[in-house]
Image (cartoon, rainbow, N blue to C red):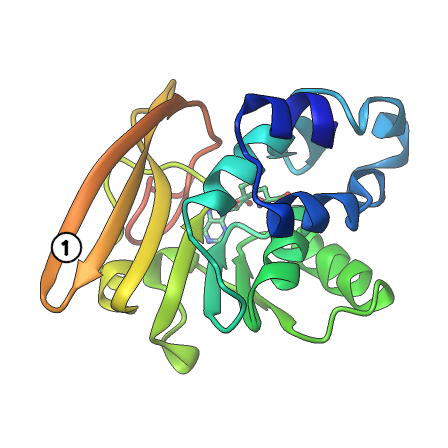
Amino acid sequence: MVERQIARRGITSPRILEAFLDTPRHLFIPKNQHLFAYEDGPLPIGKGQTISQPYIVAYMTEHLNLAGNERVLEIGTGSGYQAAILGKLAAEVHTVERHPSLAERATQLLADLGYENIRVHLGDGTIGLLEFAPYDAIMVTAAAPDVPVPLLDQLADGGRLIMPVGGRAGQVLHLYQRRGKEIIKDDLTPVAFVPLIGDHGWPRG
Ligand code: SAM
């Protein structure tokens, strides 16, 4: 998976590749999907949600430019796999999930695997997580029509935020960088993510 799907597509940072080699993806998905754990696509994880394609996890991670000393916020814990990757590359990771059962499962798994720098929070991630702000990097792993303003507000100076923005059927990954009061936005690549549901995302229900 790491060689064929990630390195061969141009993600060659040794730190990122090592983080993937050190993180057994099959542990993060339901047992009936284990056969497909290292395939080149997303997989169902329950509650109508998915663990993202490995390459997309790597691509989004790469764009955060993590050096190792950052405090990172992830919105959309899901299985906890992306958080685990971030946990290997940053000092501190806070990840927010709206489904209690997914948050509980990820909390347990990450504890069992010995991650001490990752905290899973239950709630609406579209309002961010003010308690530990500001964040050097923010990753949103669900899609909304626009970037939630509270997340931009909680981004540190020089910080980077990556998230899929667009309609229900398809989106574009956007990268936002804060330079003082200014936000610089870049459009990266087309993607298809599950919806970000909350006060500053798609409506509930
Ligand atoms: N990062 C995850 C992983 O590694 O498995 C995959 C995330 S999945 C594509 C998107 C997740 O975002 C789902 O688990 C969904 O429940 C969650 N989500 C959607 N809206 C949310 C919100 N407002 N706050 C927190 N989580 C949300």
Q: Is residue 68 left or right of residue 1?
A: left
Name which residue lies at 64% across and 32% down. 54
Residue 3 to residue 59: above or below: above
Name the quadrant of the N terminus.
top right
- Comparing 121 with 133, the one in front is 133
Q: Name the image quarter holding residue 106.
A: bottom right
Q: Is residue 143 left or right of residue 194?
A: left
- Comparing 169 with 20, the one in front is 20
Q: Is residue 96 left or right of residue 145?
A: right
Q: Is mark 1 within 8 Å of ligand 1?
A: no
The amino acid on which the numbered mark 1 sits, given as a three-letter code, is Ile
- Comparing 132 with 185, the one in front is 185
Name which residue lies at 71% across and 32% down. 2
x%, y% of residue 80?
A: 67, 52
Label 1, residues with CA under 10 Å away: few <14, some 14-19, many ≥20: some
Q: Is residue 73 visible?
A: yes
Q: Considering the numbered disc 1 on the image, is that residue within a helix, a strand or a loop? A: strand
- Residue tagged by mark 1? 183
Q: Is residue 53 visible?
A: no
Q: Residue furthest bottom?
A: 131
x%, y% of residue 55?
A: 58, 29
x%, y% of residue 45?
A: 71, 36
Name the quadrant of the C terminus.
top left
Name which residue lies at 61% across and 22% down. 8
Number of callouts: 1
x%, y% of residue 142?
A: 45, 40
Q: Residue furthest left?
A: 181
Q: Name the image quarter holding residue 57.
A: top right
